[in-house]
Image (cartoon, coloured by chain):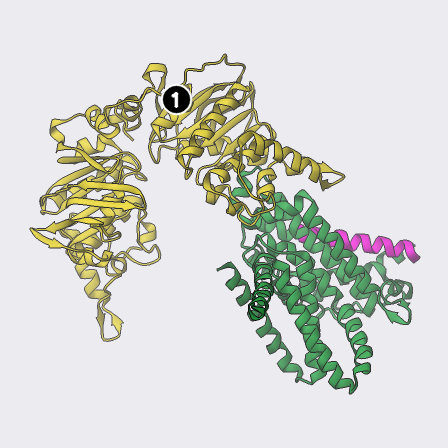
Amino acid sequence: MEKINKSFGANNVLQDVDFKLSTGEICALLGENGAGKSTLMNILGGVLPADSGSISLDGQVQSFASPVDSLDAGIGFIHQELNLINDLTIYENMFLTHLPKKRVFLDAKRMQEKTRELFQRMNIDLDPCAMVRTLDASYKQIVEICRALMQDASIIIMDEPTTSLTEPEIQRVFAMMRTLKEQGVGIIFISHKLGEVMEICDRFTVLRDGRMVAEGKVAETTTKQLAAYMVGHEVLSDTNAEKCDYGEEMLRLENLSDGVHFHDISLSVRQGEVLGVTGLLGDGRSELFQTVFGAMNGGKYTGRICLAGKEVHMHNTHQALDSGLAYLPRNRKENAILKDMSILDNGSIVYLPRMKKRGFIDQAMQERLFAKQVDDLRIKMGDRKDLITSLSGGNQQKVVLAKWLISDPKVLILDNPTQGVDVGAKEEIYTIIRRLAAQGVAIVVLSSEAQEIMRVCDRSLVMFHGRQVGEVSGEDMNEHNIMYLATGGNQKESERV
Amino acid sequence: MEKRRLEDNQSGAISWFKENWSNNALFSTVFALVVMVLIQCVVMWVNAGSFGGMFGKMGMAWLNILRNNAYQGVIALGMCFIIISGGIDLSVGSMLCALGAILMYLLAPSNGLLASLGITGPLAYVLAILLTILAGYLFGQLNGALIAYGKLPPFIATLGTMKVFRSVTQQLTKQFNPEIPAGFKLIASAKVGGQVVLPILYWVIIVIIMHIVFTRTAFGRQTIAIGSNERAAKLSGINVNSVKRRIYALGGVMCAIAAVIYIARIGSMDFANAGNGYEMDAIAAVIVGGTAMSGGRGSLIGAFLGMLIIGVMNNILNTVGVPTFLCDAVKGLIIIFAVLLQKKESA
């Protein structure tokens, strides 16, 4: 791929990116969220057209108008969400796009034979007649790779294939990748986990802000070096100067585990403190705090949650609300917006049951409490009775924040508070967070953006694969350190789960 | 110049219409009702043979529409809450039947439970009504619990209880054919100005109460929240399971009230057939009234108007002399048409 350019509106996602891959090579494609990795691969996979630039395969210039073109040219794209049909057998899934027929009936025998043949060639011990549902995530991954091979793929793109896998499963996929390599297939491996890159890849290419910033041989680099490439050298020193005295400890977690998403987490937040919790996609931080908020696992966890010094076993969200917790979820549209309700109702839904006068909603009180938040948070809107969906992303987010602030929480958990919010509103939200802290609220900010953590937090925990792997504060709280920890850089090989 | 002004006026009226049509959910329902009533006027005019004769016919027709649809109308209000919360209740018809049986068992003057305890007269009526409402509440709670805690899809849970309520009622009432005290019948059958109007009064009062509950209580808002985005509702600290149970319990209470009006009006109940198809009538009224089947959007007044639209339509079909078997086909088409309109609006 040469000089690939792509922009969405005024946003240049890719600028003159070159990328090459030889046969029998595994190349890592690295970069932070939003660096342009997915866009680049979507162009190669025919999902998106490039604005300019060219793609050549074996020296021949190609143009892909659709994923089918790309597949016909021998490029198999294994997406993060697997595209297998659970209720069909493996061999049926393998031939889903071109089911072979004998007269009108499916030629099951031929499908099974060809699948078995391929599995033998790849040293895979799977029964082609098994249902896909019965396979674990790694085997599903393998079946999908085989499906691409069945269509004579010579290049396989794997988009973060290991995020949902356990260590033995990862090793199984790696073994498969090595076999492919020996047979001359080129693999593009997208991953956030630098340890894995060191283990399996031959070369690496790093993207940052839509540009290729580094490439080279994996054998000649270190995880520290790669992390530095990903965040860039210029480290922003935009930390908070304003430190205030912290008050009482409001939230303490002791050895909290749910056995799946997070393990052995201990932390503590005091009044007036902003604690960051960061890491990369799939680090378990959302699951951790959804459990603390009673929205996940239904109270099935081990360890202790203490609020203002008292232990609470959190079963559900209304219990969390009653004990003074507030949780602003990530993915506003799915988790926070009541699209059929007005701005006012969205902003007061949390506290509605308490705004009562003789069983009915005290509308004067509702309007008064909401109006105060509109002023404080500077929410820009038309009529309070308009639908919430009439607002911009930033203002929607402020309304969601308002519904929690009306309940006057002691501990405020903000999960990706600036997701889908423009730059101006982002800055406003940061200011609001600092102001709330100054008013004595204990705040936890979950974010995968290191700059955001540095901007609003006093100190930050870093999580990797469901475990806390480090804590940074003050001088140490910089992008290098965060990225180094978040990619499992300080973990010994054996501890990488 | 003059012509242009005329055109401006015209487009002003059209845009006013369009704006209301897409922004005000009730507007299209009211509009449909007005159109139906105009058609009804024409039909009655032709039927009566004179313009003056139309009014008398219309009066009688409306009296019948209102009092004959009061039971389904009350049930439709509970159904409306349930559909707005994103659910459905197929058991309402069977529940009406089961609650009717309970009411009759409590009331029967010779062998009823209350009579055997020596309670008769108005006190017995009040007790019987309260106990029937309690039973309806518990039946609804059962539906709600299956859906909230059993995590059953509402369609399946209430399909199951629909069968259970009906068959158990039929089995238990095999040798049971009680009469109803004459005094109790007065509750719905007493004539005011020579006409039976009390069921209409009850219906309208309950519509108003339910509308206030829906618009002015936290429970009403939480119902919309759950139908709009259940996950967001849960993450807003709403006790979704408890609200769901209460929504279905409210549906059960509406069935109990409908059963009371039914028994007091008709004086008996055929346990094999009473309430058959009421669930579909109620769902139809709610949908025609502009409530989204997917939940989140809707109105109790709409459900009331929806019931009237269906009633007026039946009345027109009868008057024109459409064969009884074809009436249902027309009803079906109207429902399909109403939902098609909704789809257009949301797109």
Q: Colour of chain A?
A: yellow
- Between B19 and B254, the one nearer to me in the picture: B19
Q: Quadrant of the C terminus of chain A?
A: top left
A22 in magenta: no
**Residue drawn at (75%, 65%) of the image:** B70
Q: Is B159 located above or below residue B216 in the figure?
A: below
Chain name for mark 1: A
Residues rendered magenta in the picture: B121-141
Which chain is in green here?
A: B
**Residue drawn at (71%, 53%) of the image:** B211
Left-right relation of A30 to B19: left
Left-right relation of B70 to A117: right
Residue B225: give x, y in percent of width and height.
58, 46
Task: Tell me if residue B102 can be seen.
Answer: no
**Residue drawn at (65%, 56%) of the image:** B299
Residue B206: give x, y in percent of width and height.
76, 56
Task: Return the residue found at the far bottom.
Answer: B49
User: Magenta stretch mostly in which secondary structure?
Assistant: helix
| Disc 1 packing (10 Å; few <14; some 14–19; many ≥20) | many
Q: Quadrant of residue A319?
A: top right
**Residue drawn at (52%, 42%) of the image:** B232
Q: Considering the numbered disc 1 on the image, is that residue within a helix, a strand or a loop?
A: strand
- Between A234 and A122, the one nearer to me in the picture: A234
Q: Quadrant of residue A69?
A: bottom left
Residue B161: give x, y in percent of width and height.
62, 59
Task: Tell me if residue B272 can be seen.
Answer: yes
Kind of residue at disc 1: Ser
Q: Is A6 located above or below residue B290 in the figure?
A: above
What residue does disc 1 label?
A460
B131 in magenta: yes
